[in-house]
Image (tube, helix red, strand yellow):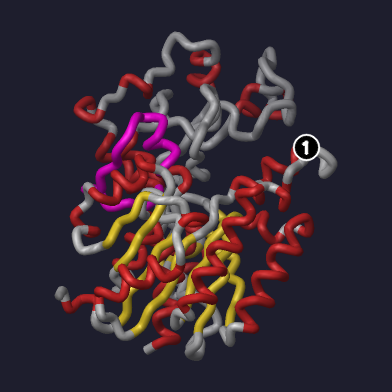
Amino acid sequence: MNNKYNEIAAISLFSGAGGMDIGSHLAGVPVGYSTDIEKDCVDSLKINEVFNDTKIVHGDLFETTSKQIYDEFNKKKTNKMIVIGGAPCQPFSKAGYWVTNKVRRGIDDPRAQLVDEYLRVVTDLSPDGFVFENVESLLHPTNKVIVDQFLEIVQNANYDFKIVKANALDYGVSQGRKRIFIIGTKGEFKSDEPKKTHGPSETCEKNNLKPYVNVGEVIGEFDDEKYFEAYEVAKGGTYYEDLCEVPPGMNYKALTAWAGYENPKFIADKRFWNFLLKLSPNKPSWTITAQPGPWVGPFHWNNRRLRVPEIAAIQSFPKDYKFSGSRRSIQKQIGNAVPPLLGKAMIEHLKESLI
């Protein structure tokens, strides 16, 4: 048996393409068991060497008993166990607030019940700790009942817990991406929050942090013809000429009267903010989305759509990481993932409380 599992190992639920799982490995917590309902995600996990010793299961958590999970995981003979993962976030996303509460499915959405399935595994298996991830909108008053129930259940199961509002930028990811984590431990937290590694350039030296990572640093090497994808071509499209006029680091509003643009082409604040949104190599990226529209950014500063290795790098996936499925599926997998460096920081914070 591979002794890397001896000290502490993780069970990963809703593993997706493996962002949190990679983060766990980077934190020194190998993943003994991973599961997801999407076949492409499971196939992505299976083709990456880092998960060669992980039991990877393609299945529906509703139909998987806690005992089945534990029996497989227990073959690793680990001393301590944690559970990691985040239930699919669509029921809690900001997009849900564009419609009225009367028609919004919200917490009645069956996908929200997956939070209960996560809690079911935690309460059944009583791991030494857990990390639960979701969108920051989970803390919106509309979803208060879900969070309150979650916290009541883990308190009754004797976990000390904390809610962490995190931005991936603070942990070395070249992307502004806000998420919340609920971290629970049966140990004792040794510090107030996960250790930040990066900060704004004007204050980072004072706080002994590195400056935020600009996107040019992580994707510059992929701006080469050998990485060309047919998907990236925007030339000839409806708004291509407008895209070319948008300066790096700005969006369609650069072409409005608001910005002093002569002969305005658009009206400020009448479009989604990420319409014709263009990266600047000298700034971090905006959030990479799972299902971007045809003229929704971020676009590359060279007036094209981003390539797979670029969106993966912006999410902080390792350069050699592989993805399975169609181009659309891969975009969804990467866009839905927890950035590995962000996951690493959260799991390190939990691990610190257990050793």
Quarter holding the N terminus?
bottom left
Which range is magenta? 315-333
Q: Residue placed at 45% from the left, 79% from the top?
A: 127
Mark 1 sits on what residue? 99
Q: Residue placed at 39% from the left, 26% from the top?
A: 302
- Circle 1 Cα neighbour tier, 10 Å, few/some/many (<14 / 14–19 / ≥20): few
Q: Is residue 251 magenta?
A: no
Residue 120 drawn at (x, y percent)? 55, 69
Furthest residue toward top: 236
Residue 306 drawn at (x, y percent)? 39, 32
Residue 334 drawn at (x, y percent)? 40, 44
| Three-letter amino acid code at the position of disc 1 | Val
Residue 246 drawn at (x, y percent)? 54, 25
Q: Residue placed at 69% from the left, 25% from the top?
A: 260
- 15 to the left or right of 160: left
- 149 to the left or right of 49: right
User: What is the magenta segment's predominant secondary structure?
Assistant: loop
Q: Residue placed at 24% from the left, 30% from the top?
A: 227
